[in-house]
Amino acid sequence: MRKNIIAMLAAAAAAATFSQQANAQEAPPPALTEAQAATVDRLIDAGLEDDLAWDLLESLTTEVGPRLGGSPAEARAREWGVRELKRLGFKNVRIETYEMPYWARISESAEIVSPFPQPLAVTALGRSRGTPEGGVAGEVVRFRTLLELQDAPETGLEGKIVFVDEPMARTQDGSGYGTAVRKRSQAAVEAGKRGAVAALIRSAGTDSHRNPHTGGALSGAGETAVPTAALSNPDADQLARALERAKAPVIVKLDLQVETAESVISGNVIGEIPGQTDEIIVIGGHLDSWDLGTGAIDDASGIAITTAAAKLVGDLKGKPKRTIRVVMWGAEEVGIYGGKAYAEAHKDEMDKHVLAAESDFGAGRVYRFDTRFSDEEAPKGKVFEAALRRLAVTPGNNMAFGGADIGATRDLGVPVVSLRQDGTDYFDLHHTPDDTLDKVDPEDLRQNVAAWAAFVYIASELEGDFGRLPVKETGQ
Amino acid sequence: MRKNIIAMLAAAAAAATFSQQANAQEAPPPALTEAQAATVDRLIDAGLEDDLAWDLLESLTTEVGPRLGGSPAEARAREWGVRELKRLGFKNVRIETYEMPYWARISESAEIVSPFPQPLAVTALGRSRGTPEGGVAGEVVRFRTLLELQDAPETGLEGKIVFVDEPMARTQDGSGYGTAVRKRSQAAVEAGKRGAVAALIRSAGTDSHRNPHTGGALSGAGETAVPTAALSNPDADQLARALERAKAPVIVKLDLQVETAESVISGNVIGEIPGQTDEIIVIGGHLDSWDLGTGAIDDASGIAITTAAAKLVGDLKGKPKRTIRVVMWGAEEVGIYGGKAYAEAHKDEMDKHVLAAESDFGAGRVYRFDTRFSDEEAPKGKVFEAALRRLAVTPGNNMAFGGADIGATRDLGVPVVSLRQDGTDYFDLHHTPDDTLDKVDPEDLRQNVAAWAAFVYIASELEGDFGRLPVKETGQ
């Protein structure tokens, strides 16, 4: 999950009500047939016993491990996806390739040079420029928030290293990330504009471990962006204390070595459960991960949950009404390249895309169900809500974000839903070396599979569609 | 705290009773005068309000940071100790130097080469030999426990990398460490004897973060010991899963580069509150830390607690009856060089050493008070126990370990006590990059200061001594 989640968070913050906006409408909501309702219950029962999602999750994180967008490891992940989808009986299994620019870290280190010499745990932000070999050193100037830096004069930091120390709030819905990620996106440019030679940020994360959080900095920032790294939270604390205690300037050296390529091949992996009609329900997660961890919560869990849920629906007798298309998007973290490429490649069949949904917020329990249907069709959300109630999922609103990888699809008019996951601990792990399999609770994962299986089945079978959303000009 | 704690743990495990062994004796225990008891209460009150320990802890971990035994950073820590002891009014402040061999890591990395290529988070064990430049690669052979490796034939692992996957139990009293540390001490030798080219161990730690735990391997193991590193717990999980899932040998490459020197200078920092007699109470912690973290719980906390407690006693009106000597031992982690040097340097005044105690188990609350007095004097433990009861400290036994740095002193006959700290979370952090200031709870730290102040005062003022312990031949 990356910075475009900001859109969702802003929307969520703006929503004054947690009930369907369309509640005001008087039309009675549609309902499942008795047979369909019984099938939903059987799917939920099966989801709560599911072992496939765990097996997929373990397999991807172990046999592939870290899989940076555009890297050879991501190519191995695509091979893995094709192998698993075929093994599970999905049809039309294929890789849809696209080109993308490449960025990878080679090495990274930082240290307080004086007056308290010691190493600092840092990681380069995605797409950060490298420093000259041997690093850059400068006096550290601390800003408590990004706003303080933005309010500073447009010169005056020549030769300095900017330190944006803004902390992040722990929240269930991930709304703390919206603010924190602005710091990550913009520190490089704001520091560069003012003459700084580098920037450090306090990690956009809620933990207290020496594992800094990477994540994309602003793309296309050009020459004004300076090399930028995230400090772990304990290291940010340490640097702040050093500044407080030092009787002389605090000098830090930062050494980031990176490699880039203008164009490499990446791809989306696709598999289908063909339906009785040419209408399509798109679900999935992103196949790539940051390089530091094994991407268990971000986003092998989403891959595993949606694939296992689709498999449960596919195992029902007879074809589903609509085609269920599982997409394992590539290169999300480094620029949502897979999500954009998918929308571009499929723009001519967007009118057949009835609904899209992505799982990309870890493996915490689904606690809320949001839709973004047309106003007229919003009452259909109640059918899903009713089915999910036994899983302790509360009704949400009709302002669903959907997911970064379906942003471009949504912007072409396709309705989306969000099965909102409990993210209280998500940003302890997100984009760090600690994003590993042991952090996933198998019971929570099963609850996700159950909720997704119910959602996918209803989305496939429900009479009528979910309307169309306004088409936006940009894909994002 | 290092491997010699094994001795304590074995002793603790063997103890069938938590009450004083000497309970059977009929003599009434000695008691404090009313004035003394009132002073104890005032010291506890002051300890519970103490800010000095936190300030010392923050200062040492921030202004010096990591301070490996024998390193320039440890020399800066000694300067820090002298400065602080003088600032606080301690007398006879000095550094007592000694020579020691030096070992430091330069770089370390590991990766699964095939069939699932990916990096592994490792750290070299202390005193490990380095690998040839570029590392060594070999097929991984897993042993679930050290015992399994020890039971394996004395050949048959030629060219292999041994992986000892033994986990560690989480316990309040640290007793899980006794078993875990054997694996850390002996894997290098046991692997080498059987022809292996390197060894990996699951970290001796209870956390699930990608921060492997360093710590000393067996010293003086000579040529049979192979390069050995600890995997973080998630990485050990990952390697075990890779072995389970692989259809071909799992090949790992390990690259450890280290530096050593036959002799460098280190030292103990000493300060005193002179008493009315020439009798001495020795307290302290160790000044060095492992290089990965800033040594907040291991053992800046011990330095801070004992110094702050001594300062509270020193601030009382009039001289204490006995001299209170605070020792900041050097180079504990890498071989208890400071503790041994202290006993050697002071062996001629050991008969003046009435009692010794070290704080070296983090900053968790003191929950139990153990003594090791002569059997005749064991009832005096009750005086301390009674005073500490209001701090929720429970009586222990007369088999106290005391601390690694006073092991050599104890072996020369000096009685010791242990203010046992809650170590439930201690091995989440111990010897990792995560041993940082933010992990210490200021309220727990104050409870320690209060307990230590009460203990030090009573130890200084109580009529009569605590007997002598049997003298052992070796210093350890």
Image (spheres, coloured by chain):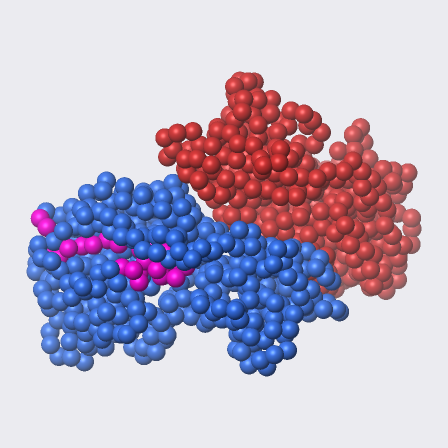
Chain colours: A red, B blue
Which residue sits at x=44%, y=40%? A117
Given residues B143 and A137, the one toward you in this image is A137
**Is residue B218 at least partly visible in the picture?**
yes
Quarter of image, res A43? bottom right
Magenta highlight on residue B322? yes
Position of A38 relative to A117 (above/below): below
Q: How far from the left and from the top, in percent, is residue B428?
A: 47, 58
**What are the residue bounds of the magenta stretch?**
B318-342
Which residue sits at x=75%, y=33%? A476
Magenta highlight on residue A428? no
Relative placement, left or right, of A189 versus A461 is left
Given residues A339 and B309, the one toward you in this image is B309
**Is residue A443 at least partly visible in the picture?**
no
Q: How far from the left and from the top, in percent, is residue A319?
A: 88, 59
Position of A343 relative to A291 (above/below): above
Q: How far from the left and from the top, in percent, is residue A90?
A: 85, 59
Looking at the rendered image, the quarter that the N terminus of chain B falls into is: bottom left
Given residues B270 and A139, the one toward you in this image is B270
Which residue sits at x=67%, y=25%? A223
Direction front: furthest residue? B262
Which residue sits at x=37%, y=67%? B5
Position of B386 relative to A465 (above/below): below
Relative placement, left or right, of B73 versus B118 is left
Q: How far from the left and from the top, in percent, is residue B302?
A: 32, 54
Looking at the rendered image, the quarter that the C terminus of chain B falls into is: bottom left
Looking at the rendered structure, the number of numbered marks drawn on it comes to 0
